[in-house]
Image (cartoon, helix red, strand yellow):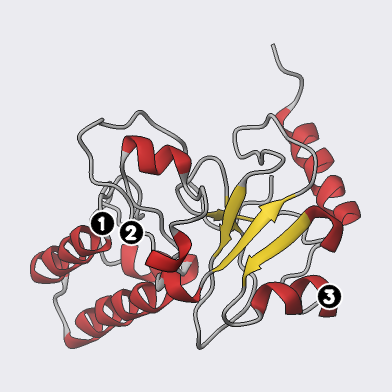
Amino acid sequence: MLILNGGMSMGRDQNRAKPYIPENHRKYPLLPSSRKDGGEVFSYPSELLSEVEAILPRGVGLTPYGYDSYEEYFAQIDKYVQKYADSDRDKELFEKYKAKVAAMNQKEDWSVLRYLGPTTDELFGLTHGNVYYWPCSKDAPVYEGVIDDEEFTSYLYSTEPEDWEILEDPTGMAYNTMFNRAKGYMSRKDYDHIQKQLKAMEGPRS
């Protein structure tokens, strides 16, 4: 699968905090695993994160996986600023990244869609009839993927109109992507081609 922002699923503590879901989205069965097991979901700028992580010591990362809330993640960023930012440039880069993540995770701006395509059984799969977030920010309403059944971050899928029903689209991003083939649009043909390439790279399963 073509991964926009990546991470692998791990077990979750039953006592973890539940993800933030805006009041007008609570009528939809969004993020069922995270609502049950806890943990927040994130959209983040992977290229900017790479720049930030270049400042950190080897083995120390900031991928936003395993956090219960955005506040917890931002507190971790602040801790790393104090510990590892040795120059004004480093501090500015951390703050730029933090501000970008904050802007990208205003769920009130995210689109909500029902998946109408076939259920896929891959790790990063989609389930027919389930409701998913398409994250975006108000200042950059561009398709960046789907918060799928793995519920960590966004991955790229086909955006063909027959595969999706728009339920909430405050920025118009989903409509523009699906029907105007705006930036990020991916045809089913292209998606299937990428899947074949990735499976060929993985080799036969044992």
As drawn, 195 above or below 95: above
Picture coordinates of residue 35, whole percent (x, y): 37, 43
Cα distance in 3D space between marks 3 and 1: 34 Å
In the depicted view, which residue is nearer to us: 192 or 46? 192
Q: Are marks 2 and 1 in contact (CB under 8 Å)?
A: yes
- The secondary element bearing badge 3 is classed as helix
Residue carrying label 3: 179
- Which corner quadrant of the image does residue 165 belong to? bottom right
Amino acid type at mark 1: Ser
Picture coordinates of residue 44, whole percent (x, y): 44, 66
Residue at position x 33%, y 69% in the image = 52
Residue at position x 65%, y 81% in the image = 172
Tag 2: Cα neighbours inside 10 Å, few (<14), some, or many (≥20)? some
As drawn, 119 above or below 62: above
In the depicted view, which residue is nearer to us: 10 or 137? 137
Residue at position x 65%, y 78% in the image = 173
Left/right placement of residue 101 relative to residue 179 reads left
Q: Which mark is residue 20?
A: 2
Amino acid type at mark 2: Tyr
Q: Are marks 2 and 3 in contact (CB under 8 Å)?
A: no
Residue carrying label 1: 69
